[in-house]
Amino acid sequence: MRSKSTPQLTEKPLLFLDTSVLFAAVFSALGDSRALFHLGELGVVELWVGPRVLQEADEVVSEKFPHTRPLLAQFLALSNVQVGPQPDEAILEAAHQWVANPPDARVLAEAVAARIEFFVTLDRKHFIENPALRGAVPFKMGTAGDCLAWLRNVLRA
């Protein structure tokens, strides 16, 4: 989990979910990613995705796992997942400097544009262990398990 600075916590913590987290929630009934969706459903957190995240998830699910499409749609609806704004050019340019893979840079830019507090991803290579992101983004970043640990501390305070 890395952060340039920790933004002031809103009434409900704002979490941005990467495509990998959406897939993990669909395919694992007991995993940490699914737990985040339950917290969204209970109204404990606000879950956000970007337009690219939704597009990517829909493309992969439609092509490789079409039988899971209704389940993904149900999770998104029941958990009140919000779609963030398109990032502006300045944010996109910065994200491309931090992340070499263009689709992942776009996802990162969407997270920045959404002004979230925690970016949840399972992508260690491009995000979690990316040294270019250390101190560069204005939010915490980590796996669903990292996020749950962060939430336990934040919600206790």
Image (cartoon, grey):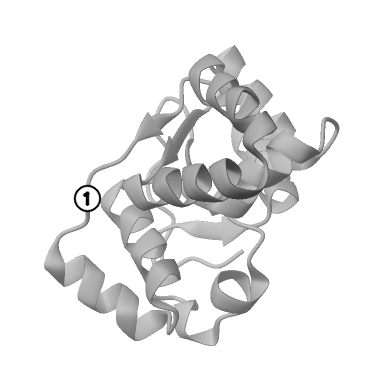
Q: Is residue 116 above or below residue 13?
A: below
Q: Nearer the viewer, residue 147 or 10?
A: 147
Q: Residue at x 44, y 57 (%)?
A: 139
Q: Nearer the viewer, residue 156 or 2?
A: 2
Q: Position of residue 55 (x, y in %)?
A: 40, 47
129 lies above or below 157 = below
> Residue 141 at what x, y percent from top left?
55, 60
Query: What residue lies at 62% left-to-right and 53% top-to-bottom?
Result: 20
Dot 1 corresponds to which residue? 86
Residue type at mark 1 is: Gln
Please, which residue is most extreme toward the left here? Answer: 89
Residue 59 drawn at (x, y percent): 49, 48
Which residue reaches farthest right? 30
Q: Is residue 100 left or right of residue 127?
A: left
Location of residue 100 in the rendering, given as x and y in whole percent from the top left corner: 43, 84
In the image, 121: left or right of 92? right
Q: Is residue 82 visible?
A: yes
Identify the residue shown where x is 63% and y is 36%. 66
Q: For numbered disc 1, what is the local secondary structure?
A: loop
The answer to whether residue 157 is visible is no
